[in-house]
Image: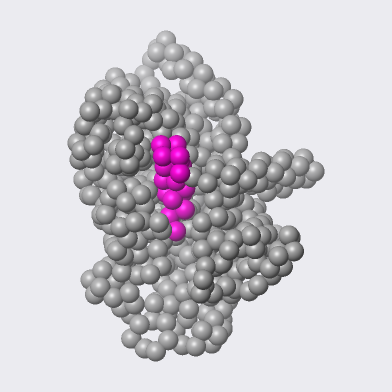
Amino acid sequence: MSFPANPKEFTVRGVLLGILITLVFTAAQIYLGLKVGLTFATSIPAAVISMALLQAFRSATIQENNIVQTIASAAGTLSSVIFVLPGLIIIGWWAHVPFFMTFAACAVGGILGVMYTMPLRRALVVQSNLPYPEGVAAAEVLKVGTSTREGAQEGKAGLWAILMGSLTSAFVAFTAAVKIIPAEVAGFWKVKAVNGQIGATSLLGGSSLALMGAGHLMGITVGIAMLTGLIIASGFALPYLTSITPMADGATIAQHAGAVFRTKVRLLGAGAIAVASLWTLGKLIVPVWLGLMSALESNAAVKRGDGEVPRTDRDLPVNTVGIIILACMVPVGWLLAHFIQESGTLQPLLIPLVGAGVAFALVAGLIAAAVCGYMAGLIGSSNSPVSGLAILAVLTASLMVGVLGRSLTGPDEQQALIAFILFLTTIVLAVAVVGNDNLQDLKTGQLVGATPWKQQVALIIGVIAGAIVIPPVLELLNQAYGFPDDPNRSAITAAPLNAPQATLIASLAKGVIGGNLDWELLGYGGIIGAVLIAVDIIVKKVSGGKMSLPPLGVSLAIYLPSAVTAPVVVGAVSGWIYEKTVSKRSWGAIAKRLGVLVASGFIVGESLFNVAHALLIVITQKETPLAFMAAVDEHLGTIIAFAMAVVIVVGLYVWSAGQAKKIDTQT
């Protein structure tokens, strides 16, 4: 596919459309991430929306559509700061999310992520054999949508797929809000544990199309991994731990099982997550090091080269990049100093803590951005274990700050040190996740003839747009739902959002600084994680690399409640059946892409509805502002929910296959 020498690329309409998509998708990502601990890549849905809307302009180009998806991709990455940021609420440091501090931490960290990965483009994108699965997929969507009649039809069908997925999932969430169907169904019963004692277990299910959509996007491999984790948690860990834990006086089986899950089973999951994350990162040390060496060699070769650099190979000038990086250290230092001044108790350590924090952001941010950028090329942005980097960052920061703050041993000082660590880790995580996204976008740009420096500027715009929407949405959800273990929790509803990674990372920071974690259970969880790693290695070897059991997916399912993991597993299996059914058809590839867009719509619609519902909860100060009718009997409601899910999911899959066949027939 040939590209013009100077195409229309960076336009006002493209930038505005990209910002609008970023605002919407970021709000959806925040809710999903806090609910289930996962986010999804927004590049492909954004590209489809862009193509469908910009078709009204004859002058629209593939490069202009690429700028839109580049800006919007920030929504799928920067929102990952919620894996750490709510920890400041969970430990009781913040009662509310401050807008400026949160915005600035996200914006400055995101800009650094773009700058840090810029010098790696030639080595890790242009001269590399890394697959960049999401970047290549986004480029293919843009090419198909721009160059052929089939693509134009697919773009329109794709937009309808997102819209119908969004509207149906929002409708299901609405029926749960008005109590026609239960938002969650729980079953608790006594069982005999492996020690012969009587314990308890539970199985929960949620009526969430968003979680089913997430399962479709994750795929069958991750779905089976999460099913394995669900079996470990509910089939083994919970019965055993409830059998050896005395039941509180007057407690029911449900209350006993719920308490043990929250205080004990989740610690097992946390230990498994930590070991699985470190293993995943450890495997990438050698390829990342080789990638960095290649980047340095490539940059040296460019400096020695002669002649004019083609448009498709022009980055922002290296001097400009260096100045921006150094300039960003000023707001980083100011933010850390302001945070310390607000704490009051850390004033004696202001200079050493700020100095160490700036150095940590500079060095750890660079390493994290490079590692994440390489991982994005190797396994994709969505699969990149940024949680593992967050764990490493918080542990390293905790050890560093712990040494500096050793002279301050009171509980108030310890709390302030933990809060400082979490805030510093938020900045570093913002650097890492945007670096994770930048190279993926640049790969898409390389394949569609984009100008690298324009993409880099576009991603900075997306970062700023995402940073603007994160604080108010996070605060809205905090007021409406709140987070677990928050000592100051004053949310209107009784059920908090899980915020699994933030809860884990806050616990790790507490453990290093205060030594108040149940290290024994964490250790057992670590052993489970090590066993899962060994099983994954065996499965890959026996299957010749065709199958795997991702230990991080299993570990996450141990940590999360079954009301979250069960719908994800169902969605993964449903998506696998659908893709297997259409894969051998001539129109199978189109059908698969439309299925992905329907699943993305499921996530966007339900998530945005729940954000709007949270706003209504806060405005009315009522836990169930839409419950204007008597709740339907739970058994009947469950039947209705099941029937709705089957009709909607099967119906939209059939519609997607029909549209794909129609598009293929007419071309």
- By secondary structure, the bulk of the magenta-drawn segment is best described as helix
Question: Front-most of 242 and 467?
Answer: 242
Horizontal and vertical percent position of residue 352: 28, 24
In percent of width and height, residue 389 lies at 48, 37
* Residue 468 visible: yes
502 is within the stretch colored magenta: yes
Q: Quick check: can you spot residue 118?
A: no
What residue do we see at 41% from left, 67% from top?
Answer: 495
Which segment is the magenta one?
Answer: 498-516
* Vertical order, 363 against 88 (above or below): above
Q: Is residue 461 above or below residue 637?
A: above
In this view of the protein, which residue sits in the foreground, 182 or 201? 201
Residue lying at the far right in this picture: please name it.
542
Give the residue drawn at x 43%, y 77%: 176
| Residue 238 location, quadrant | bottom right
Can you give x and y, in whole percent of width and height, for residue 365 in the image?
39, 30
Identify the residue at horizontal 38%, vertical 81% (top origin). Answer: 178
* Corner quadrant of residue 121: top left
Q: Nearer the viewer, residue 590 or 568?
A: 568
Q: Nearer the viewer, residue 134 or 353?
A: 353
